[in-house]
Image (cartoon, grey):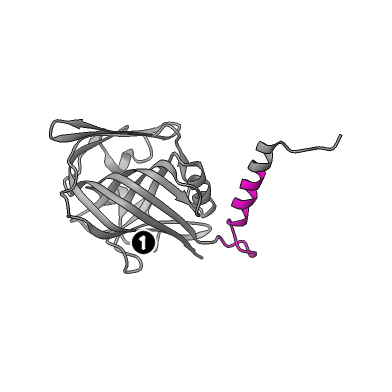
Amino acid sequence: MPNRLSGVARRCLALLLTLAAGIAHADGTPRELQVTFTDCTEFAGLTAVSRTAMAPLVPAGFALADFGPDTAGAVVRIANCEGVSVDGSNPVPGTVSHIGANLVSPDGTGDINNYTLLYATDNPRLALRLRQFGLPVRLDPSIAYEVTPSGAQLELYAAVHPGAGEAYFLHGTETDPPAGSEIPFLANWWYASRKGRLRMSTDIPAIGFGTADIAFYTAREIDLGAVFNANRTTFPLLSVRGKFAVGNMSVTLAR
């Protein structure tokens, strides 16, 4: 009897072949990756941390932004979108979370530039593609992102379990952006690996920012514990709830 693939197996094989075709040029260099995020809300916070603790986590070629004597900036972001489309795939709901070091722009672009210390998502396709570009993405199918009305405000609870012995969560109150307050915004997140220098550049044509009073909670003994040096961290430098209809992320790798 001939060996026949089931319909499900054929579809899985076709998906793998499609992904493989987009991984690299003939010489093995990764192709550019395009990701579209639609109907999104986010929290983004910036806080001051020890420059001495942060500097060893950022490789040569990147300059930490200066926030004062022995002070660097740490960024925490989590975004939840109704649609995440990777290289033109059908959009599906998804969440991404970054923790990073605030940088002086390495290439003169971007409204904000950060070096990626941790990147987590519940989207398997996005995790796979970013790993092919050298980013050690943590796939966390159980990421929580809950926004609940609380009087005139919103209550945010978000939790990420990026790997064994690593976990953090965010909790507090937010407000939606004022109507008509949207502005264009370009965010660059960087990472360096043996594959080269990665830039994840997200162009948001119109984003509104509301207020946020959010705290970040984590264990001191995890890898990032030495940076925050606290179980509870607030964000006096920047603390906002963002809301946008579409964001286009272009991922490139320079060797």
The image shows residue 91 at horizontal and vertical percentages of: 45, 46
Q: Position of residue 132 (x, y in %)?
A: 54, 52
For the question of whether residue 198 can be seen, the reply is: no
* Residue drawn at the location 25% of the way across and 53% of the way down: 72
User: Looking at this view, is 217 or 37 the one in front?
Assistant: 37
Magenta stretch? 12-30
Q: Which residue is mark 1?
A: 62
**Residue 118 occupies quadrant:** top left
| Residue 110 shows in this picture | yes
Which residue: 65% across, 47% down? Answer: 14
Task: Identify the element where label 1 is drawn.
Answer: loop
- Residue 181 left/right relative to 243: left
Q: Quadrant of the N terminus?
A: top right
Tell me what residue is drawn at x 50 percent, y 41 percent: 124
Residue 20 is inside the magenta segment: yes
Q: Position of residue 223 (x, y in %)?
A: 38, 39
